[in-house]
Image: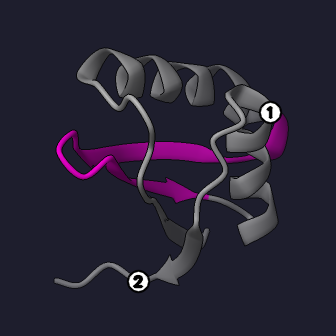
Amino acid sequence: MPLYMDIHKNVEGLTTAAVTAAHQKDLEVQARYGVKYLKYWYDEGTGTVFCLCEAPSKAAAEAVHREAHGGVADETIEVKEGE
């Protein structure tokens, strides 16, 4: 299944607790879209979040965020894992 990395920029009020809660909501919704969110990274100082998932399509990955918490990414890119 394809891998997608998304980036959320300038997230207002980004905290460890907020990003953890948003990720948990993604996990609760993901099966409806055939998506599996794998990892996320964030920087509270800049309000930036990166999410990595397996998804059947870019649209499916975006739909999970939209339904789970409304935090739609600024950009979603299909990526391949290197060795």
Q: Is residue 68 left or right of residue 24?
A: right
Instruction: Determine which quarter of the picture holds residue 44.
Output: top left
Residue 64 visible, this orientation: yes
The image shows residue 35, relative to residue 26, as above or below, that is below
State the extent of the magenta-drawn residues as a range. Answer: 32-54
The image shows residue 53, relative to residue 34, as above or below, that is below
Q: Which residue is mark 2?
A: 80
Q: Which residue is mark 1?
A: 67
Front position in the image: 29 or 34: 29
Identify which residue is drawn at 51% across, 55% down: 53
Q: Quadrant of the N terminus?
A: bottom right
Bin the neighbour count of mark 1 within 10 Å (Cα to Cα): few under 14, some 14-19, many 20 and up: some
Q: Main secondary structure of the magenta part?
A: strand
Where residue 60 sits: x, y (%)? 78, 56
Front position in the image: 83 or 28: 28
Q: Is residue 51 left or right of residue 82?
A: right
Whichever of labels 1 and 2 marks the residue nearer the N terminus, that label is 1
Residue 57 visible, this orientation: no
